[in-house]
Amino acid sequence: MEELLYFVRLTLRYLLWVLDLAMLLRAIFSWIDPEQSNRFSAFLYMVTEPIIMPIRKLCYKMNWFQGTPLDVPFLITIVIIMVVQMFV
């Protein structure tokens, strides 16, 4: 049982690390290629957007951060990923 728990924690830790890296790369590529005309940019968008979308919908539903130049739901998602990484 301990081995299974260790495997689950390790797998979750690696998945969160890959997701964190994908979020960072998405942020960098959004400055370089904002239209996602590159296949890699489109892939990063496809991987990260399902994780960002619930926070984005909540922020729009509550009218939070409307009209700000930053993508605040993106930043909130990164913070949530980092908090989860600390507890795993």
Image (cartoon, grey):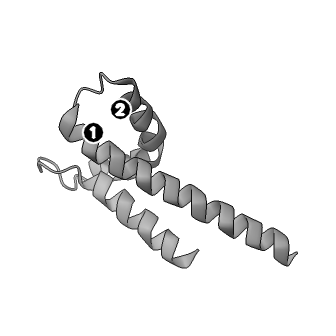
Horizontal placement of 3 versus 58: left or right?
right
Residue 44 location in percent, x, y? 41, 37
Which residue does the image show at 40% across and 30% down from the upper left?
A: 40
Residue placed at 22% from the left, 56% from the top?
64
**In the visual, does 42 lie left or right of 87?**
left
* Element under disc 2: helix
Question: Position of 88 compared to 83: left or right?
Answer: right
The answer to whether residue 51 is seen in the rendering is yes
* 22 vs 66, nearest the viewer: 22
Dot 2 corresponds to which residue?
A: 41
Label 1 SS: helix
Q: How packed is label 2: few (under 14 Cα within 10 Å), some, or many (20 or more)?
A: many
Image spot of residue 47 (x, y percent): 48, 39
Position of the C terminus by quadrant: bottom right
Mark 1, residue position: 29
Image quadrant in which you'd find residue 11? bottom right
Residue 73, given in percent of the width and then of the height, sits at 30, 53
Q: Quadrant of the N terminus?
A: bottom right
Left or right, 21 with reference to 13: left
Residue type, label 2: Ser
CA neighbours of label 1 inside 10 A, class few (<14), some (14 to 19), many (20+): some
Q: Is label 1 in contact with label 2 (beta carbons under 8 Å)?
A: yes
Which three-letter amino acid code belongs to the residue tagged 1? Answer: Phe
Work out how far the residue at label 1 is from the one at label 2, CA to CA, in angstroms.
6 Å
In this view of the protein, can residue 56 be seen by the observer? Answer: no
